Image (tube, rainbow, N blue to C red):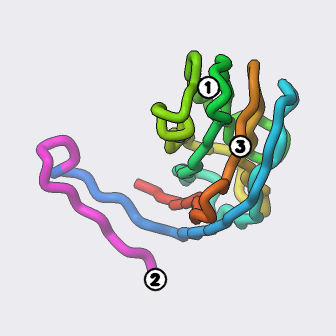
């Protein structure tokens, strides 16, 4: 059974979409990286139901850096299997010190997947452009959310 979603924001009042499926995956992976090579923070499998649907993927990832007075820069990316789905979400902190609250930033990458139906793996990665990037220093919970919709 599909759920019909209608908006009241004057953007989609004449159209509705069906929610074909959804998945929420929470995680608390601890990673410290200085590598410019993407490191997988979290991944999960989802079976796309329809070849004509769109899958909206969002993630929330809290990234921290050392309070060492150095510059830090990092990227996070979303993938469908081995295909990158969105432009790099990039962030930098310069001369991070203790007064900067550990350089903590909540990254929220988003993407839309229009690929074929079937089983896929969605993956969130983190890489350091320079300096160091860390996840889950304070024991928090991050998440990835998938919603498959069809007009």
**Which sits in the foreground, 28 or 51?**
28
Q: Is residue 44 magenta?
A: no
x then y, percent, for residue 80? 74, 46
**Which sits in the foreground, 88 or 63?**
63
Residue ID for mark 3: 134
x then y, percent, for residue 52? 58, 51
What span is in magenta? 1-12
Q: Is residue 132 above or below residue 16?
A: above
Label 3 secondary element: strand
**Which sits in the foreground, 19 or 34?**
34
**Neighbour class for label 3 at 10 Å: few (<14), some, many (≥20)?**
many
Q: Are marks 2 and 3 in contact (CB under 8 Å)?
A: no
x then y, percent, for residue 87? 61, 25
Residue ID for mark 2: 1
Label 2 secondary element: loop
Residue lying furthest bottom: 1
Q: Report the Cα–Cα distance between label 2 and label 3.
A: 41 Å
Residue ID for mark 1: 87
Q: Residue at x 75, y 42 (%)?
A: 125
Of labels 3 and 1, earlier in sequence is: 1
**Neighbour class for label 2 at 10 Å: few (<14), some, many (≥20)?**
few
Q: Report the Cα–Cα distance between label 2 and label 1.
A: 34 Å
Residue 118 in sight from this viewpoint: no
């Amino acid at each position: 059974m599909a759920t019909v979603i209608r908006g009241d924001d004057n953007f989609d009042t004449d159209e509705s979409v069906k929610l074909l499926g959804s998945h929420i995956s929470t995680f608390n992976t601890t990673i410290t990286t200085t590598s410019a090579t993407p490191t997988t923070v979290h991944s999960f499998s989802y079976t796309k139901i329809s070849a004509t649907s769109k899958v909206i993927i969002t993630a929330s990832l809290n990234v921290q850096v050392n309070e060492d007075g150095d510059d830090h820069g990092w990227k996070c990316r979303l993938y469908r299997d081995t295909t990158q789905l969105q432009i790099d979400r990039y962030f930098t902190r310069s001369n991070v010190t203790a007064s900067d609250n550990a350089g903590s930033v909540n990254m929220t990458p988003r993407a839309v997947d229009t690929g074929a139906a079937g089983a896929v793996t969605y993956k969130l990665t983190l890489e350091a452009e320079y300096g160091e990037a860390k996840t889950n220093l304070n024991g928090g919970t991050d998440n990835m959310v998938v919603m498959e919709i069809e007009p």
